[in-house]
Image: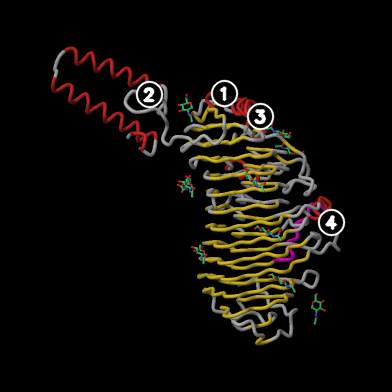
């Protein structure tokens, strides 16, 4: 019965209540010296139990913290078996390392699970191993140490050539993995907290000589699942899968302050294929999602695209950047991306594709369906002059291709500029389709559907009225009006 109570703390309160009731009943029937002795004995047993911790076993209720932890592998361990303390002060790095070393021996037998019990577990960065499940109990919180000397430096990503914000080496991630297979990070909504505040501050004060580290970064790996947990306050990008295959992110909450948490992107699939991101809530200090594939000449040389990515059923928010982005680093190419059933609220931009001369690569076969914008400065954005480069050696002739993009069932309210698609003579946008769009605008100006160097069509009812660059078709897909001027430029960054 007590087992069904939701949280360990509630259970403890319940135990206390039961003890009190029992003692009262006892006192009223036998007011003897024996009673006092009994109370003393019970009291000390109770105190002893408390010293074992709330989650310890008890004689009043069956053992077990809040929710029983499911066994998802043939073998399961508890972080406390390896010296974990969980008081938020002790350094748990060695406990994590010992646990993961032990788990690495179980690969051939189906792998093993590491349970992180309720508590606060302060750690420096550590590496995962293959065939492991990291399970964060309800009220379990892994905290990243803030001392940057404890974060190892790693070489730049090959497809970036440089650190993304400082040249040379970059900090690794709090939870890291390379060349792995079959890794699960899940739980009862436990939290991985990067405690990024000190990093954001140092970054703003220009005290860092290296690019900040992500919260979770998995490289050159496959069959990765992240589900049912919370990721928060990453120093830099939150989850960064790099050159991975078959990754699922499901039912995850990702949080960072919406202002002054620089570059805390939510999820950045980078040269990844076969990825699903679904049922997540993301509210962060930069893009909620940004699909990437390397930077200029380094990304072109590395040549690994991001493709076959499905993003659905999300609620996202980004006051600084955009809800769902592609780029700006896309030099290995990005294709076959579907974004559907997404609510983007109170954001600077809803969806954005960003690139620049020098990137090379392509963005194509991108489908947006059933998106709702609830309060955004700009709704749909394509920007082709996002001129951040790793160094001056980029190839000015490396022009990205942007084409075959469709927007269907796009709704919204409280949007200032619903569409701003800014192609250029060098990077024209081709074959864009709009079908069924109705976005309530906050700004009564004619050209709120802004275009330049774009070729494509609108089908059916589109509000606000589309730019003249696009061909117009009726609901039955019969041509109504052919555009005479795909190169017309009607872009106004002042509204
Ligand atoms: C882990 O061990 C601690 C201390 O022994 C215990 O309180 C907790 O219930 C255990 N948790 C799991 C998930 O086994
Ligand atoms: C994790 O593994 C990588 C690759 O072997 C290594 O470079 C890095 O230093 C390791 N990180 C930690 C914290 O041990
Ligand atoms: C999503 O996560 C929450 C919190 O961890 C959990 O209560 C809920 O059951 C999960 N939803 C699904 C569909 O698994
Ligand atoms: C999971 O925890 C986060 C952070 O505490 C919270 O915002 C979110 O609502 C929780 N998710 C569920 C499904 O309970
Ligand atoms: C950063 O580099 C500068 C110049 O080389 C050096 O003076 C400073 O101590 C470095 N800062 C850190 C935090 O390493
Ligand atoms: C993808 O990964 C999941 C989780 O490890 C696994 O169950 C599934 O079989 C993998 N799919 C493929 C096609 O390998
Ligand atoms: C495109 O991606 C989806 C997953 O979103 C996948 O099912 C489909 O096979 C991919 N199409 C191609 C042509 O690879
Ligand atoms: C459209 O997306 C919303 C979430 O934003 C969802 O509630 C709704 O069911 C979706 N509609 C369809 C037809 O899938
Ligand atoms: C235009 O893009 C759509 C996908 O949005 C694709 O199905 C179609 O084949 C493309 N047309 C051309 C001529 O490339
Ligand atoms: C429009 O721009 C495209 C791409 O830059 C160019 O090839 C074409 O000649 C231009 N057309 C006109 C009429 O200027």
Q: Residue at x 66, y 38 (%)?
A: 176
Secondary element at tag 4: loop
Q: Write down the residue under mark 3.
A: 104
Determine whether, in the image, residue 193 is placed left or right of residue 108. left
Q: Is residue 60 one of those drawn in magenta?
A: no
Q: Write down the residue under mark 4.
A: 394
* Pointers 4 and 1 in contact (C-beta within 8 Å): no
Disc 4/disc 3 C-alpha distance (Å): 42 Å
Pick the front one: 443 or 290: 290
Q: Write down the residue under mark 2.
A: 50
Answer whether residue 115 is visible to the viewer in this image: yes
Secondary element at tag 2: helix
Magenta span of residues = 383-394
Using a 10 Å C-alpha cutoff, classify the residue at mark 3 as few (fewer than 14 neighbours), some (14 to 19) or many (20 or more): some
Using a 10 Å C-alpha cutoff, classify the residue at mark 1 as few (fewer than 14 neighbours), some (14 to 19) or many (20 or more): some
Answer whether residue 232 is visible to the viewer in this image: no
Q: Is mark 2 within 8 Å of ligand 1?
A: no
Q: Nearer the viewer, mark 1 or mark 2?
A: 1
**Residue 82 bears which disc, if any?**
1
* Pointers 3 and 1 in contact (C-beta within 8 Å): no
Disc 4/disc 2 C-alpha distance (Å): 63 Å
Mark 4 or mark 1, earlier in chain: 1
């Amino acid at each position: 019965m007590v087992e069904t109570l939701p949280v360990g703390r509630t259970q403890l309160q319940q135990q206390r209540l039961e003890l009190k009731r029992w003692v009262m009943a006892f006192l009223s029937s036998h007011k003897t010296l024996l009673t006092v002795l009994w109370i003393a004995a019970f009291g000390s047993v109770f105190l002893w139990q408390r010293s074992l911790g709330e989650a310890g076993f008890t004689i009043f209720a069956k053992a077990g913290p809040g929710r029983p932890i499911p066994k998802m592998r043939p073998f399961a361990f508890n972080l406390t078996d390896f010296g974990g303390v969980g008081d938020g002060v002790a350094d748990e790095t060695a406990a994590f390392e010992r646990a993961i070393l032990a788990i690495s021996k179980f690969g051939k037998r189906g792998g093993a699970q590491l349970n992180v019990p309720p508590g606060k577990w302060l750690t420096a960065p550590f590496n995962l191993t293959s065939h492991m499940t990291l399970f964060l109990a309800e009220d379990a919180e892994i905290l990243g140490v803030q001392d940057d000397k404890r974060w190892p430096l790693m070489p730049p990503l090959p497809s970036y050539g440089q650190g993304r914000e400082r040249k040379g080496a970059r900090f690794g991630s709090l939870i890291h993995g390379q060349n792995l297979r079959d890794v699960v990070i899940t739980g009862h909504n436990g939290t991985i907290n990067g405690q990024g505040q000190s990093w954001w501050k140092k970054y703003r004060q220009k005290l860092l000589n290296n690019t900040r580290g992500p919260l979770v970064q998995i490289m050159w790996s496959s069959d990765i699942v992240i589900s049912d947990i919370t990721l928060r306050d990453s120093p830099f990008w939150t989850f960064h899968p790099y050159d991975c295959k078959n990754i699922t992110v499901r039912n995850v909450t990702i949080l960072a302050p919406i202002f002054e948490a620089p570059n805390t992107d939510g999820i950045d699939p980078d040269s990844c294929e076969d990825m699903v991101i679904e049922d997540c809530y993301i509210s962060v200090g930069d893009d909620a999602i940004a699909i990437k594939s390397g930077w200029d000449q380094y990304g072109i040389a590395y040549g690994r695209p991001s493709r076959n990515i499905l993003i659905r059923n999300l609620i996202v928010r980004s006051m600084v950047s955009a809800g769902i982005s592609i780029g700006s680093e896309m030099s290995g190419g990005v294709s076959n991306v579907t974004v559907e059933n997404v609510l983007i609220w109170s954001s600077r931009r809803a969806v954005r594709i960003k690139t620049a001369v020098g990137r090379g690569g392509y963005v194509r076969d991108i489908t947006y369906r059933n998106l709702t914008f609830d309060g955004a400065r700009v709704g749909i954005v394509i920007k082709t002059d996002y001129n951040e480069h790793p160094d001056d050696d980029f190839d000015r002739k490396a022009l990205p291709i942007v084409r075959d993009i469709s927007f269907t069932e796009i709704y919204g309210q409280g949007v200032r500029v619903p569409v701003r698609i800014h192609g250029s003579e060098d990077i024209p946008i081709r074959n864009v389709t709009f079908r069924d769009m109705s976005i309530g605008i906050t700004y009564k100006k004619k050209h709120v559907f802004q275009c330049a160097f774009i070729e494509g069509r609108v089908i059916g009812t589109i509000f606000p009225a589309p730019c003249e660059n696009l061909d117009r078709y009726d609901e039955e897909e019969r041509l109504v009006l052919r555009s005479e001027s795909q190169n017309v430029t009607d872009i106004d960054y002042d509204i």
